[in-house]
Amino acid sequence: MTRPPPPGSLRRRSLLRVFGVAALRSLPLGSAGAALVGAALPAAAARPELTTFDINRDEDGVYLSYAVDFDLGRSVDDALMKSVPLFFVAEATIFRDRWYWRDRRVAHAVRAWRIVYQPLTSTYRVTTVGGLSQSYSTRADALGAINRSSHWKIAEPGQIEEGAGHYIEFQYRLDTAELPRPMQIGISGEPDWQLSVKRTLRLN
């Protein structure tokens, strides 16, 4: 009768086929298994960071300058390389303090971008929603065009009441609501797609 292989031998043979004999021959099975698990897990994208956030107010209104440092997670990057359009949104809202009721929204500004990879030309097309389009040769340049804004007007002077307290709520995010519906269901809860950063700041 053929004796069955010792426990773990089949798993070790599989590891050897994946990593090569020389790479794993000196490792105990536990170490080899850990190496396989580590290799199978995709690297998580770093959380986005708001590196610049400045508010300026003058007689012409309220202006916001910001910069968001982020990279795309593996599954988001894979979708982009398959020519799935990605939408990014920057949103700024100014509220006036009210002690007797909910704070009143006095100003609201939104900017949105669409980025899509074009395989025929190996370029990235960035379109400002409702505005202009431009192509970039690298992903880094394309993301650099949408992750910052300088002197963005978010309120008119008459919207800010002198002597009253105001604060600004800002959010920059990857808008998954613009993805195809079946894809929205498939990525639900995946960390790579939860790209968002927020900041609240007192105006006066």
Image: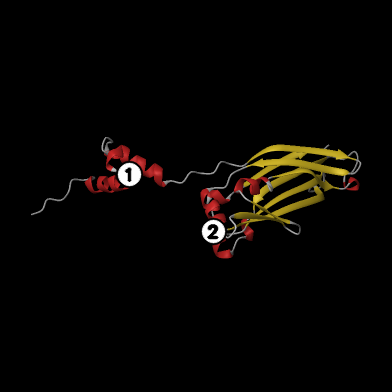
Residue at horizontal 79%, vertical 51%? 108
Q: Nearer the viewer, residue 24 or 192?
A: 24
136 or 143: which is nearer to us? Answer: 136
Residue topped by disc 2:
82
| Dot 2: element | loop
Residue 182 locus on image (x, y percent): 55, 64
On-image quarter of the N terminus? bottom left
- Who's the residue at 51% across and 49% down the image? 74
User: How far apart in space, not on screen, are marks 1 and 2 (Cα)?
Assistant: 29 Å
Q: Is residue 6 left or right of residue 84?
A: left
127 or 166, nearer to the observer: 127
Residue type, label 2: Lys
**Residue 21 in picture, x, y percent from top left:** 27, 42
Q: Quadrant of residue 83?
A: bottom right
Checking the image for residue 127, the label placed there is none
Measuring from the top left, give residue 61's x and y in whole percent. 87, 44
Please report whichever mark, 1 or 2, sits nearer to the chain's N-terminal start.
1
Label 2 environment density (alpha carbons within 10 Å; few <14, some 14–19, many ≥20): few
Q: Are marks 1 and 2 in contact (CB under 8 Å)?
A: no
Say what secondary structure mark 1 lies in. helix
Q: Is residue 46 left or right of residue 68?
A: left
Residue sitting at the far front: 121
User: Residue at the spot x=74%, y=52% of the render?
Assistant: 111
Q: Amino acid at mark 1?
A: Phe
Few, some or many residues within 10 Å of mark 1 (<14, 14–19, 20+)? some
Instruction: Locate residue 68: give its quadrant.
Output: top right
User: Label 1: which residue?
Assistant: 19
- Nearest the viewer among 60 and 136 is 136
Figure quadrant of the C terminus: top right
Q: Position of residue 55 (x, y in %)?
A: 79, 38
- Which residue sits at x=10%, y=53%? 2
